[in-house]
Image: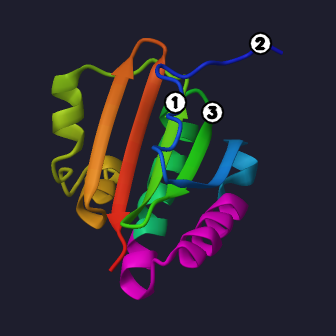
Amino acid sequence: MADHHPVAPLAVPPAGAVALLETRFDASGVTALRHHVAARAAVAGLRGERLDDFVLAVYELLTNAVRHGGGHGRLHLWHDPKSVTCEVADTGGGFDPVTAVRLAAPPVPATPGGWGLFLADKLTDMIEVTSGPRGTTVRISSALT
């Protein structure tokens, strides 16, 4: 089996951050991984609606990686005293910056799909997208309140 490398390596958590989870995933592990992310983000301090929103945003990134990014990816989750951050990287064909902006806009109502990056953007405090021919990396973060 070939070793797949995302477009950008998963970031090492910044100084003072605590790594919560780092793993590879595919379609068979998305639901279980969502539960692991929820548990670890809760331990880190996300609560209530902020926790639910963060977990939904992560789930959207996971399913995007499976559907559009080569069928698998890597997740890296960490927290610092102010926030919880998740980075999802895949090995799909990527997309150009103009497409990334369009994907962060509300999808056309009659079109199936298209909610992933839009929801991730609206449900978290920060989103960064890096994409190229070797894959896409998306980082989201939610502040601890």
- Location of the N terminus by quadrant is top right
Residue at coordinates 37% horizontally, 84% vertically from top-left? 49
Mark nearer the N terminus (3 vs 2): 2
Tell me whether circle 1 and circle 3 mark residues in contact (CB < 8 Å): yes
> Among all residues in the image, which is located at the extreme right?
1
Residue position for label 2 = 2
> Among all residues in the image, which is located at the extreme front?
16
Residue position for label 3 = 71
Give the left or right position of residue 103, taking residue 91 as reference: left
- x then y, percent, for residue 89: 52, 34
Question: Looking at the image, is mark 1 or mark 2 nearer the viewer?
Answer: 2
- Location of the C terminus by quadrant is bottom left
68 relative to 48, above or below: above
Residue position for label 1 = 69
Front-most of residues 6 and 12 = 12
Is residue 145 visible in this depiction of the protein? yes
Question: The magenta stretch spans which residues?
Answer: 31-53
Q: How far apart are marks 1 and 3 (CA)?
A: 6 Å
Q: Is mark 3 on a helix, strand or loop?
A: loop
Q: How far apart are marks 3 and 2 (CA)?
A: 14 Å
Tell me whether circle 1 and circle 2 mark residues in contact (CB < 8 Å): no
Q: Which three-letter amino acid code belongs to the residue tagged 1? A: Gly
Residue 24 on the magenta span: no
Q: Is mark 1 on a helix, strand or loop?
A: loop
Is residue 26 visible in this depiction of the protein? no
Residue at coordinates 55% horizontally, 78% vertically from top-left? 42
- x then y, percent, for residue 11: 49, 34
Local crowd size for mark 2, using a 10 Å CA cut-off: few (<14), some (14–19), many (≥20)? few
Mark nearer the N terminus (1 vs 2): 2
Give the left or right position of residue 107, taking residue 28 as reference: left
